[in-house]
Image (cartoon, rainbow, N blue to C red):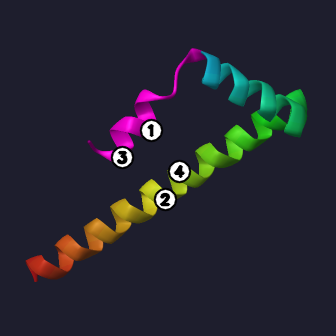
């Protein structure tokens, strides 16, 4: 059996609630939106960089 399937199969609602409670205790309610905004902007920058790289790669192959 695949390790990822076993690991994902073990995560349920009680574990998700426990993770959320732990995050609230560690970071507090005010820091979590800031962390999520930072994570979102990081993902957006990564996607933009990937698109630019693919565009540059396609332009170099078309020449």
Cα–Cα gap, marks 3 and 1: 6 Å
Residue 6 to residue 29: above or below: below
Q: Secondary structure at mark 4?
A: helix
Cα–Cα gap, marks 4 and 1: 24 Å
**Residue position marked by numbered label 3 in the rendering:** 3
Asked if disc 3 and disc 4 are in contact, CB closer than 8 Å, the reply is: no
Asked if disc 3 and disc 1 are in contact, CB closer than 8 Å, the reply is: yes
Residue 47 versus residue 11: which sits nearer the camera?
11
Label 3 vs label 4, nearer the camera: 3
Q: Secondary structure at mark 1?
A: helix
Q: Earlier in the sequence, mark 3 or mark 2?
A: 3
Asked if disc 2 and disc 4 are in contact, CB closer than 8 Å, the reply is: yes
Cα–Cα gap, marks 3 and 2: 27 Å
**Residue position marked by numbered label 1 in the rendering:** 7
Residue 6 figure quarter: top left
Cα–Cα gap, marks 3 and 4: 26 Å
Instruction: Find residue 52 and report its horizontal and vertical position in percent.
Output: 36, 66
Cα–Cα gap, marks 2 and 1: 27 Å
For the magenta stretch, what is the residue range? 1-13
Q: Residue furthest left?
A: 62
Residue 10 versus residue 30: which sits nearer the camera?
10
Residue 25 figure quarter: top right
**Residue position marked by numbered label 4 in the rendering:** 43
Q: Earlier in the sequence, mark 4 or mark 1?
A: 1
């Amino acid at each position: 059996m695949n390790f990822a399937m076993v690991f994902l199969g073990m995560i349920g609602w009680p574990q998700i609630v426990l993770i959320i409670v732990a995050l609230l205790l560690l970071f507090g309610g005010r820091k979590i939106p800031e962390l999520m905004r930072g994570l979102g902007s990081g993902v957006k920058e990564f996607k933009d960089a990937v698109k630019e790289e693919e565009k540059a790669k396609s332009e170099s192959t078309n020449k």
